Image (cartoon, helix red, strand yellow):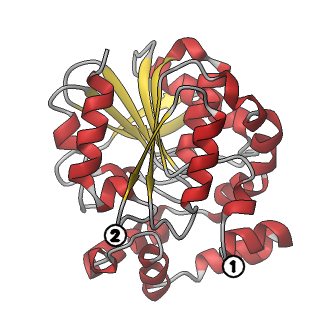
Amino acid sequence: MSHPPFSPFDRYPPQFVRVNQHRTAYIRHGNGPPVVLLHGYAGAIWNWEHQIETLGRRFTLLIPDLIGQGLSDKPRLAYTPPLYIEWLRGFLDAVGVGRAAVIGHSMGAGLALSLALTHPDRVDRLILISGFPPGLFNHIHGSYLKRLHWLGSGLLFGLGYHLLGRRAFRKFLGGLVWDRSLVTPAVVERAYQLRKHHGKARPLWSSLICTDDWESGYAPRLGSVTAPVLIIWGRDDRFIPLAAGETLHRMIPGSRLTVLPDTGHLPMWERPDEVNRLLMDFLSSS
């Protein structure tokens, strides 16, 4: 498998580890207590590119591409919540980490929560960025994901995915941030090349239709999360609005909610200085 020559891989070459017989791509950087960073749906390692250097000064960062996405293997499996949880538990074992702080973005936040509910001994503390609320599709406004989920057509989903071009990526990424000037031609090209050379529609479709399993099996138990929880949300998130973050905050006892103004669905990428300060303070607190 060839490695894309773009950031952050130009500075932090990916490593590969076998998890339940499937290869997982990840970046390992820094020294200190372990921190796992999980990207969201249709995301990738690059979503965390602005955290690597800052957090790596005090922590050992482990940043994987989720199974079925990015440079990781994409086996023909049902991408259910239990599959993701078992993959993440296996990833921790494979990289020699028994217990870690876990930071999740969007769907990655749902995975982080699910791990904390299923294997609480593996999670030191949780940081949830822009996700993952119960009743997800009731919160999302005007999303093609919402329409496809209700339509239930994997064929249409796959066709649309393979036809995605640079213009579509520019529009999609522009909808995830408040400041659209951040979506430069280089950023669009990176997302396009990842889809073209490493993307597959089937894992994404399977993840989408299995969201109902998270709603029934995990969301009702959010009140039993025992790890300290910080929630970070963009006030101007057009993908999953702030009301969803407020709901999540109410459902997790003792959680803290920080709202960032002029910020969309990718706070850690759009407002890295503010987010990194929040992450460092929370991860370093006793």
Give the CA separation, mark 2 to mark 1. 21 Å
Q: Nearer the viewer, residue 44 or 230?
A: 230
Residue sitting at 83 percent across and 68 percent down?
A: 150
Residue sitting at 56 percent across and 23 percent down?
A: 89
Q: Which mark is residue 190?
A: 2
How crowded pointer 2 is (Cα within 10 Å; few <14, some 14-19, many 20+) is rated as some
Looking at the rendered structure, the kind of residue marked 1 is Leu
Up-down: is 70 above or below 31? below
Identify the residue at the far bottom of this view: 167
Tag 2 near tag 1, CB within 8 Å: no
Up-down: is 254 above or below 134? above
| Residue 46 appears in the figure | no
The image shows residue 24 at horizontal and vertical percentages of 47, 38
State the image quarter where residue 280 is shown.
Answer: top left
The image shows residue 217 at horizontal and vertical percentages of 80, 34
| Residue 131 appears in the figure | yes
Secondary structure at badge 2 equals helix
Residue carrying label 1: 159
Up-down: is 175 above or below 133? below
Secondary structure at badge 1 equals helix
Horizontal side of residue 118 vs 285, given as left or right:
right
* Numbered label tally: 2
Residue sitting at 20 percent across and 51 percent down?
A: 273
User: Of label 2 and label 1, which has the lower sequence position?
Assistant: 1
Up-down: is 16 above or below 183? above
The image shows residue 144 at horizontal and vertical percentages of 67, 76
Residue sitting at 72 percent across and 73 percent down?
A: 157
State the image quarter where residue 34 is shown.
Answer: top left
